[in-house]
Image (spheres, rainbow, N blue to C red):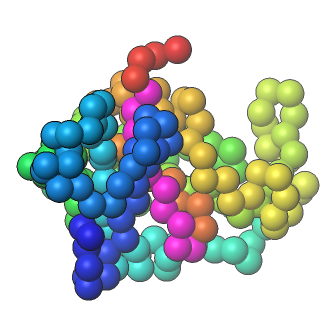
Amino acid sequence: MLVRSSPVLVFLLAAALSGAPVHAQRSPATTRAVAGYVRVPYVLLPDSVRNWFASRWDDTSRVQKESGGCLTYRREVTRLGDTLYWVTSATLVTPEYDSQRGIEFTCPHHAARWHSHTPTTCRSDTWGNVNYASCVLGGVDAYSCQPSGDDRVRLRAVGAPFGLIHCDRRALVPYFPARRSP
């Protein structure tokens, strides 16, 4: 097991990215014997970072906007070629634009990014303007943990290796850049 007794969450997204079966442990002999071995990115978060995110979550207000920021991390490559991203801290940034349905902000080039998806659903007009009077807790848009296509393309454009979506008090879901622009 990668982490046995340390209180670290490991997020594994390889199955979603590749469709190939993923194993928690691999011996070098097994890896050499398996054709088409898939190199796997892992995002690891210590309790201090997870607790920072949990303290920012609000599931009581029906009127909320997305928030976002930058992540600092260190990168390691295992002897099998898998990449580990150890997140060391998260910061909140002042957005250039934010709403219940989206956020625009800037991080340094190549910096990993995070943003929240709120626990609310709001109606909007044809042009995407949110009607905040219509917002409710829950609903079809609440707690969405999927990145949009724009999220993935944006990561690629800024050279970020991964991003996180904060979609519930303790839910932090990694996503990775689009392989090519649409």
Residue at image location 46% in from the left, 16% down from the top: 181
Residue 9 falls in image quadrant: bottom left
Residue 5 to residue 125: above or below: below
User: Which stretch is magenta?
Assistant: 169-178
Q: Nearer the viewer, residue 167 or 56?
A: 167
Q: Residue furthest right?
A: 134
Horizontal arrangement in the rendering, residue 169 relative to residue 10 (left or right): right
Q: Is residue 78 left or right of residue 85?
A: left
Rendered location of residue 95, percent (x, y): 49, 47
Picture residue at 84% right of the left edge, 58% below the top: 139
* 143 lies left or right of 68: right
Q: Could you say which is closer to the camera, residue 125 or residue 180? A: 180
Image coordinates of residue 88 in percent, x first then y, are: 23, 65
The stretch drawn in magenta includes residue 174:
yes
Horizontal side, residue 133 vs residue 155: left or right = right
Which residue reaches farthest left?
79
* Quarter of the figure that contains the N terminus: bottom left
Between 62 and 78, the residue placed more toward the observer is 78
- Disc count in the image? 0
Q: Could you say which is closer to the camera, residue 118 or residue 95?
A: 118
As drawn, 43 above or below 18: below
Is residue 48 among the parts visible in the rendering? no
Q: Is residue 77 above or below residue 11?
A: above
The answer, for residue 165, to whether it is visible in the render is yes
At 23% from the left and 55% from the top, the residue drawn is 26
Please tell me whether residue 182 belongs to the stretch shown in magenta: no
Instruction: Measuring from the top left, give residue 51's x and y in whole percent.
Output: 41, 79
The residue at the point 24 percent across, 67 percent down is: 2
Q: Please identify the residue farthest to the top as the structure is shown.
A: 182
